[in-house]
Image (cartoon, rainbow, N blue to C red):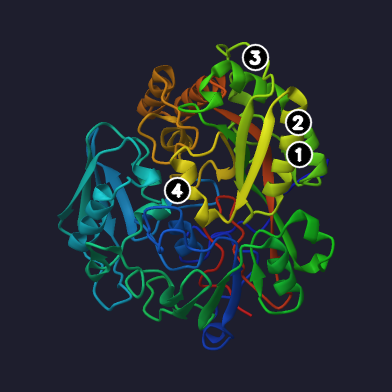
Amino acid sequence: MRRRHLLGALLLTPVLTACFASSGDDSPSAASGGSRLRVALAFPPAENLSPYGADATLLSRLGVTEGLTALDANGAAAPALAESWRRENDRSWLFTLREATFQDGSDVTPAAVAAALTHATEAKPAPAALSGVTLTAEPAGDAVRITTKTSDPVLPLRLSSPNLAVFAAKAYSRDGVDPVGTATGPFELTKVTGSTSAALDRFDDYWGGRAQAPGIDARFIADGTARANALRTGQVDIAEAIPVAQAASLDKATLEETATTRTTSLQLNTKSGPFKDPKLRAAARRAVDGSALVKGVFEGYADPGAGIYGPAVTWAAGKRVEPTRRAAAARPNGTAVTLATYDNRPELPEVAQVLQQQLQKAGFKVTLEVREYSRLESDALAGKFDAFIGARNSLVDTGDPVGVLASDYTCDGGYNLARLCDQKVDKAVAEADEATDTSRRQDAAMRAEAAILGTDAVVPLAHQSIIVGVGTDVRGALLDPYERTLVGTGTRR
């Protein structure tokens, strides 16, 4: 099997922005010129660029938004809009702000930050980073005091989530949050053309220094072959999520591979339909052969699914706990199920086809439904499919291993595609969330993972690497295992 490697240049930029740069030149002379970057993204906006859902990552990958903290190369909380913080007591933290300016010219003040976080707590549905968490924010001199209803030892990690980006007061209205010209990042969103493109200009007053590229022209290209062709023909400078099937046809010098914390999984609808029966879920799990997917679909750019956390979460393998309460598998006897996935990640329809064959061999009758993600998400969350194949980054929401468990597999989870509501799972996740010591929190997270896997609500299929296409004249593209960043102050051509 191909050995994946985390690219060697996972270095923080001189002004710490938790970015992962392949190369770059931060000299004043480099910042004075340069060409606009042309970037192809795989996912069009699904929620009008709301920062509270999946679109939040689009904004962070384009260098538009920031939160109080960021993630460094080791997955620890690093300074962003907050230059430092300290824990006052079990439930209260004080975050001291740096001097910074919103893109509308107003100052980033404690009152503005407190108001932004308050808006996030009031969003419906709740941002994934706040799943199961109640917090209040208030100004305290040159700092912001954040108090949680219960102890939250990973609050600095939680605040790094793209869901909790900070915007100027003018961004907020009854209609939602308008990110155009109201964020704090090195690039200012100036125009959005539906779900096809967006234009960004350099924000010259960015606290971390003037970006080297004068702006970004972003295109949302859901079709992976089209993204690869755009890179091949020089129409774009950076193309994310190059399909493995297209990698061989591109110049090797333009391909950058990095391990990620992303896992492709089969989510089974536990609330309605055939997979409400745990014995049929067990039958589906037994039918799956992840090694065939890795070899035949991912062409070695993945490992067979071992759990919710994959090899890029380096501590997980040594702490993994085997599920103990799985149901006995029933005979499907021609049970009809609908299996859905999306084509923004071109491997997923292929995974679905292989899985269809595996499930049918086991005795299920499987109907496939493939759509672009923005046209699929609401139906998936509403439980309109019996099964769903998705690729989920287990650390993207908070950087905390417990966060994805709370949002995806608890009764109140905001991204619960399996519609799982199990008291034992909720208890295990709650116990993990209460652990304050890092090692004990990881141990508890693995026990919670075992409780979730024991329900067969989710069947891990493969742990992926990603391939980013980067033009040979581009410097400073950001290769991030957490998939939160793509361009930053040092990215240029």
**Secondary element at tag 3:** loop
Please name whichever residue, 331 or 87, is drawn nearer the observer in this view of the structure. 331
Please name whichever residue, 438 or 398, is drawn nearer the observer in this view of the structure. 398
Residue 379, numbered circle: none
Crowd band around label 1 with a 10 angstrom C-alpha radius: few (<14), some (14–19), many (20+): some
Report the residue at 29% width, 48% height from top: 124
**Residue named by callout 3:** 329
- Whichever of labels 2 and 4 marks the residue nearer the N terminus, that label is 2
Q: How far apart are marks 4 and 3 (CA)?
A: 30 Å
Q: How far apart are marks 2 and 4 (CA)?
A: 27 Å
In x, y percent, where is residue 200?
46, 78
Q: Distance between the residues labelled 4 and 1?
A: 25 Å
**Secondary element at tag 2:** helix
Q: Distance between the residues labelled 2 and 3?
A: 15 Å
Horizontal side of 32 relative to 1 (left or right) equals left
Q: In which quarter of the image is the C terminus?
A: bottom right
Horizontal side of 411 relative to 211 (left or right) equals left
- Amino acid on which disc 1 is placed: Val
Crowd band around label 3 with a 10 angstrom C-alpha radius: few (<14), some (14–19), many (20+): some
Residue 354, numbered circle: 1
**Residue named by callout 2:** 358
Report the residue at 41% width, 75% height from top: 188
